[in-house]
Every structure is written in C-alpha cells, then in structure tokens.
Amino acid sequence: MITLVDTSLRDGMSSVSHQFTPEQVGAVAGGLDRAGVRVIEVAHGIGIGASSIQYGFAAATDVEYVRAAVAAVDRADIAVLYVPGISTLPALDAVRDAGASTVRVATHCTEADCAEQPIRHARDHGMRVMSFLMMSHKLEPAALAEQAAKLDSYGAQVIYVVDSAGALVPGSAGARVAALRDAVQADIGFHAHNNLGVGIGNALAAVENGATYIDGSLRGLGASAGNAQTEALAAALERAGHHPGVDVLALIEVAEHVIAPLMTEPQIIDETALLLGYAGLYSTFFHPAKRAAGKYGLPVRELLLELGRREVIGGQEDMIIDVAAELSSRERSA
C-alpha cells in the first residue's frame, strides 16, 4: 500500500512567502482530506519555529495553521516539520497540543545523530515520527543507509530519502531507496523536488524499489522548481499499478479550484531552479540566490555554480552573500 503525503501547506509555503492564511490552510486541508489523502503537512515552509526575519515571517503561527487544518479534516493526520537548530521541543509540544499527530524530523543527510532527541521526545509523547535525510544526493547509497540505520535505532517509523536539491534521477533515487530498504526496519519514504524535471519519475522509481510513503504537493507547489505534483503523481501511480487510495479527480479539483487561485506565479523550472538541481544546491536557495546575484550585478548561474563547487548546504545561507560579494570583487579587480 502506498501512502501519499501532501506537503502543499508546508513546502508549498516557500512559494507564497509563507503567506497562506489559516482559512486557506483549512480549505486546502479539507479538500485533500475529502480526496483521501491521509497525511497532510502544514506550517512554515522551513519548519515549526522558523517564522523569523531570517527565514521569513509567516502570516500566522504554526499553532494557528495546525488548528485550522485539524478543524478541516475528518480522517487525515496533520504533520509538521521539525528541523533541529531551528525548531524546539516546546514548539513541537505546542503543535502536538493543537492536534498535530505526526512529526517529520529533518537533518542533513550526514547528521542523523542530530535527530535523536526530537525523535525520542516525539515517540515518548505518542506522535508518529517520520525522519528526513535531506540532500540525499550528497551520499552514496551505502553511506546514506548507515545514516538511516541511526534514525531507525532512535525510533523513526518512516525514513525518507529527500532530494532537497532535485539533483537525483530515477536510477540514483531508486538505488538510495533500495539501500535503505535493506538496512532498516522502518518504512521508507521519498520526497522529490523537480529541478531536473524528473520528480514524478524519481517517485515512481522509489516505489519500485520499496518506498511506501511518497510526498507530493498540489500543482507542484514548493521551493524553487517545486515538488512532485500530487494530482499528477496519484494518476501516475495508478497507471503504474500502484494504488495510493486517493480520488484522483477530487485531487485535480482541489488543485484547480483551491490551490491555483492562491498561487502568486506558475511553478516552473526556470534558469535558477534548473541550476540548483544541476549544481546540487538546496532548493530554498532559490530566492536568496536571485537577490544576491541582483545586488552584486552577477549572472545567477555564475553564483550558483560557484556555490555548487563549494558544496554549500542548507544552514549556510550566509555563504550566498559572501560568495556573491567575493565574485563581484574579483570581477571588479580583474
């Protein structure tokens, strides 16, 4: 059985500068619930506790978003994202009290040990725990599986290969899922970004290699090029003989009549989004890289390729400005 997880109201927040209102969250969550989606992720795009001058202020609090989603659904579980170093245990307790029943604990793929405390805390308090190995393209399958084994030992019930940069292709996505499937007792999930245009292909490859939890977002809404598109993903899974237990036509209705009017611009693979995937950079670098390139008069491709060469990862957003300033100074002195 494939469980389709929708992240329009969390990853999709990055596409609308975290400005969905609680009323809009309720409308989307209610539509997803009626379509049969059983896990719906909500809150600030960077995770609970991230609303700030650094990551962008949201239109409401995480608790308000969770309450709105919980009130709108009859059967779906409401999930939140927890990023150690940004999120806190009190923030997790607050959204749990508001009705969130699942937490997705996200760390860089080499830093699974940072997830131990929130995983154990959440399990001790009755929450279902999914755990994200972000930027999974940075590790070869065997090394990624070693990190997954740590998450397994802490009590994660679902462990995700997360293509944060949209840098994987079906073969490399499938290989990582297969390696995790052989290494852990937990279920395996896959979270695709679409920077190279193969998000749904990667998700299908993940399923063929043993993943049973697959993420999508309506209209592909998400950071940079966005995610695998929930309604298209559901249709593709059915055509491939996998049945995620959702109503594809109802999903299309929610995408067309609820999400589409809320989008500030179409979710496309433009130069910046494509280069993020090509250079293997975190998808949330999309807007900061564009701003920095404009401020310092650089072609965005020059900045992104240099950031890629330096293997900058999520949490090093300050490097975007530093590298842009360095490249600009170098060009002026040349």
Image: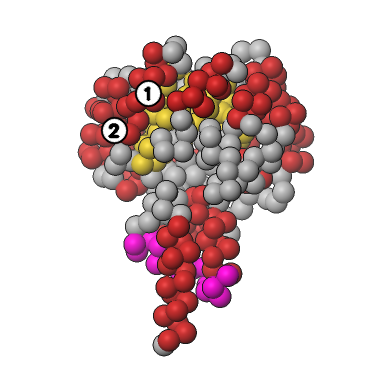
Instruction: Check the image and tell me how it is coloured.
Output: secondary structure
Q: Secondary structure at mark 2?
A: helix
- Badge 2 density bin: few <14, some 14–19, many ≥20, Cα 10 Å: some
Report the residue at 55% width, 21% height from top.
94
Report the residue at 41% width, 80% height from top.
330
**Magenta stretch bounds:** 295-310
Report the residue at 61% width, 13% height from top.
75
**Residue 284 seen by the camera:** yes
Per the image, is 297 magenta? Answer: yes
Looking at the picture, how far across and down is residue 334, in whole percent? 41, 87
Per the image, is 19 magenta? Answer: no
Hey, what amino acid is under mark 1? Ile
Q: Which of the 4 image quadrants contains residue 286?
A: bottom right
> Between residues 202 and 90, which one lies in front from this camera angle?
90
> Between residues 204 and 47, which one lies in front from this camera angle?
47
Give the CA distance from mark 2 to mark 1: 10 Å
- Badge 1 density bin: few <14, some 14–19, many ≥20, Cα 10 Å: many
**Residue 241 seen by the camera:** no
Q: Which mark is first along the chain, 1 or 2?
A: 2
Q: Using the image, tell me which numbered label, if any, was put on residue 113.
A: 2
Q: Using the image, tell me which numbered label, if any, was put on residue 260.
A: none
> Between residues 274 and 49, which one lies in front from this camera angle?
49
Report the residue at 48% width, 64% height from top.
321
Relative to 149, does residue 288 appear above or below in the rendering?
A: below
Looking at the picture, how far across and down is residue 307, in whole percent? 40, 62
Looking at the picture, how far across and down is residue 63, in whole percent? 61, 25
Dominant SS type (magenta): helix
Q: Is 326 positioned to the left or the right of 245 in the image?
A: left
Q: Using the image, tell me which numbered label, if any, was put on residue 119.
A: 1
